[in-house]
Image: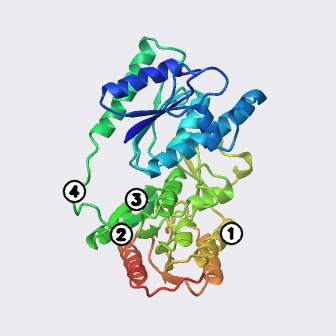
Amino acid sequence: MAVVLIATLDTKGTEARFVRDLLRAGGLEVITIDAGVMGEPLFTAEIPRQEVFAAAGKDYEAVRAEGDRGKAIEAAAEGVKAIVRKLFDEGKVEGVFGLGGSAGTTIGTAAMRELPVGVPKVMVSTLASGQTRPYVGVRDIAMLYSVVDLAGLNRVSRKVLTNAARAMIGMVARKEEPEAGEDRPIITATMFGVTTPCVEAARKRLEQAGYEVLVFHATGTGGQAMESLIRDGLVDGVLDITTTELADELVGGILSAGPDRLTAAGETGTPQVISTGALDMVNFGPPETIPEKFKARRFYRHNPTVTLMRTTPEENDQLGWEIATKASAAKGPTAIVLPLGGVSALDAPGKPFWWPEADDALFSRIGNEVSSRVDLIRMDQHINDADFAIAAAEKLLELIEQKRAGAYVSPS
């Protein structure tokens, strides 16, 4: 097995060779991939650029002659991604190391996002101090800011690259297998600060039943990460208590997980219990960042950088339709548990977001639209009441056992 080193060897060859030699000195095998296009590579890679573009279905000489840098980067990213995935599937990859500016970062992280959680991934990038979500996505990519541009070796770049190489050496060399019996079947859960008591109580019950509970913060990337893990086939059950990201996607808040949120469990047939946690709110930044069209709405200042906006009956009606539709399309055992006493810590009598008409619109639309194949459970409790949390956990355990025993027949 080897560490894959990804770089454009025409523009970043000096730095790549420096890192390659450090990794080899640390006892690692290295497979270098050249993702360059225009200039000549500084040294010969184990996988040359011609193979990279061929893996993307492109002819290298044609791409070079066209001279379109954007298209070349796009093709290189596709080619490197395909090659690294193939190497991984063949059992030849124990880590991936990338370095570069915008092009190198785009290419390197595209390959890293193809690999599962747990495979060491280090990206030294000039972009690492900015918005890294497009590069990291939902994978465990360690991005290290280069501080200076990667334009030759100097006292700063040598130190940064050395630290990054040592990090990769440490991750690979210290890799330890879990003790026998340590891993338990996985349940994922979604949580917000305003639904924490519910999820914590449910988590304890599920752990008592022998499950490992992975809790995801419903901040957009959290929901995306959970959906990705479910699609990877690593999850036995889903306790989707906090579906608040749907509200941000619908209304235009900053914590959307995209239109595919609440679909992975249904598509894979994974048992799931869905609730309406924190659907009373849409997330924005400081007050001055809130769009003008919302100025007359009801707000709560969560902290100096987060402002919450109460969802309306009309918005909750649409959210109810979305939840019912996605739950009804599920291929596996599915239940929806509704907390009629309130959906968050702010949605209770005397609290800032208490609005029974808005909650009723949400609950009614779900009840009217959901398929009879979905277990719909209405409870008078607030979402953070212990009885509600335990009921949701017990229902998920029941659905998992139903799936395991073969007692559930998929509608597809």
CA–CA distance between discs 3 and 2?
11 Å
Return the disc, 3 or 4, that comes first in the chain's sequence: 4
In the rendered view, does 257 fall on the left or right side of 251? left
| Residue at 45%, 70% in the rendered image | 383
Mark 4 lies on residue = 179
Percent coordinates x, y for residue 142 in the rendering: 43, 37
Quarter occupied by the C terminus: bottom right
The amino acid type found where label 3 is placed reads Val
Q: Secondary structure at mark 4?
A: loop
Return the disc, 4 or 1, that comes first in the chain's sequence: 4
Locate residue 196: give its quadrant: bottom left
Mark 2 lies on residue = 202
Label 2 CA crowd tier, 10 Å (few <14, some 14–19, many 20+): many
Q: Which mark is residue 215?
A: 3
CA–CA distance between discs 4 and 2?
26 Å
The amino acid type found where label 2 is placed reads Ala
